């Protein structure tokens, strides 16, 4: 079955530390991958997406993610986190040739940034 | 663009009452999704529609839950009768041609 897994459930960092959140997907072939962020009390917002092309994807607010096909991974990175990055982060994916709109979401990673 | 619109934003009701949640997707989007989010179970997909037709309702917890999409600009999720374990945040999301999903602000439901 198709799945998306996030290794870290809860991450605590100090401001200015570098961030890397892991995401792995289980299906081969063409994939579409996404990272969403959910700030406390808010809805999910799209951070970045990968459909094809350059495997290094730049998103909003200084986030980036790298698609590594050989590792089935799409890790999220940010060189220097801020207190305002405290949020829950969701990785999601779908098979690129799928004719459904359904995304498979990971379990989410809660990031706490200490000022 | 107003984004995905959901109403009400907050709903408090008593056990046994009927609850109706509403969603207006982004204009031109052909997919609509209903999710439920709780601390215990995380984010769950309940049902989704394509061109107003329900495609997959396997996530609907039980017969007390029903969803409709009478036209491209409106969908409802109904719980009848409601129970305390239905308390959660319910999100609606829409997408165009199966690409990225855009989420609404959610409805926080509390069933007493």
Image (cartoon, coloured by chain):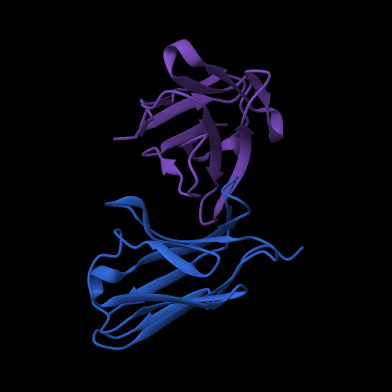
Chain colours: A purple, B blue
Which corner quadrant of the image does residue B93 belong to? Answer: bottom right
Q: Is residue B6 left or right of residue B43?
A: right
Residue at (54, 33) in percent of width and height: A32
Q: Is residue A99 left or right of residue A46?
A: left
Residue at (52, 70) in percent of width and height: B52
Whether A13 is drawn above or below A101: the answer is: above
Residue at (38, 29) in percent of width and height: A6
Residue B56 is situated, as x and y percent measured from the top left of the image, at 37, 59
Tell which of B23 and A94 is nearer to you: A94
Whether A18 is drawn above or below B85: the answer is: above
Whether B100 is drawn above or below A83: the answer is: below
Tell which of B50 and B88 is nearer to you: B50
Residue B79 is situated, as x and y percent measured from the top left of the image, at 32, 79
Tell which of B95 and A29 is nearer to you: A29
Residue A34 is situated, as x and y percent measured from the top left of the image, at 55, 36
Whether A44 is drawn above or below A53: the answer is: below
Which corner quadrant of the image does residue A65 belong to? Answer: top right
Quarter of the image that includes the C terminus of chain B: bottom left
Residue at (30, 77) in percent of width and height: B111
Q: Is residue A56 left or right of residue B68?
A: right
Tell which of B47 and A47 is nearer to you: B47
């Amino acid at each position: 079955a198709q799945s998306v897994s996030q290794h870290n459930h809860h991450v605590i960092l100090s401001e200015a530390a570098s961030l890397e959140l892991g995401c792995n997907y289980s299906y081969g072939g063409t994939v579409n991958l996404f990272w969403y962020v959910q700030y406390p009390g808010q809805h999910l917002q799209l951070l970045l997406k990968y459909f094809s092309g350059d495997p290094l994807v730049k998103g909003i607010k200084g986030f980036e993610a790298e698609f590594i096909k050989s590792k089935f991974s799409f890790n999220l990175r940010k060189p220097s986190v801020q207190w305002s990055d405290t949020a829950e982060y969701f990785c999601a994916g779908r098979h690129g040739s799928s004719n459904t709109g359904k995304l498979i979401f990971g379990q989410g990673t809660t990031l706490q940034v200490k000022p | 663009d107003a984004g995905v619109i959901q109403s009400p934003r907050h709903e408090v009701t008593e056990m046994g009452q009927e609850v109706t949640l509403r969603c207006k997707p982004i204009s031109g989007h052909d997919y609509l999704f209903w999710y439920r989010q709780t601390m215990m179970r995380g984010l769950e997909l309940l049902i989704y529609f394509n061109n107003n037709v329900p495609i997959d309702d396997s996530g609907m917890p039980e017969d007390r839950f029903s969803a409709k999409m009478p036209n491209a600009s409106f969908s409802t999720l109904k719980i009848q009768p409601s129970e305390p374990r239905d308390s959660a945040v319910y999100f609606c999301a829409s997408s165009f041609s199966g690409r990225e999903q855009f989420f609404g602000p959610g409805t926080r439901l509390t069933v007493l």
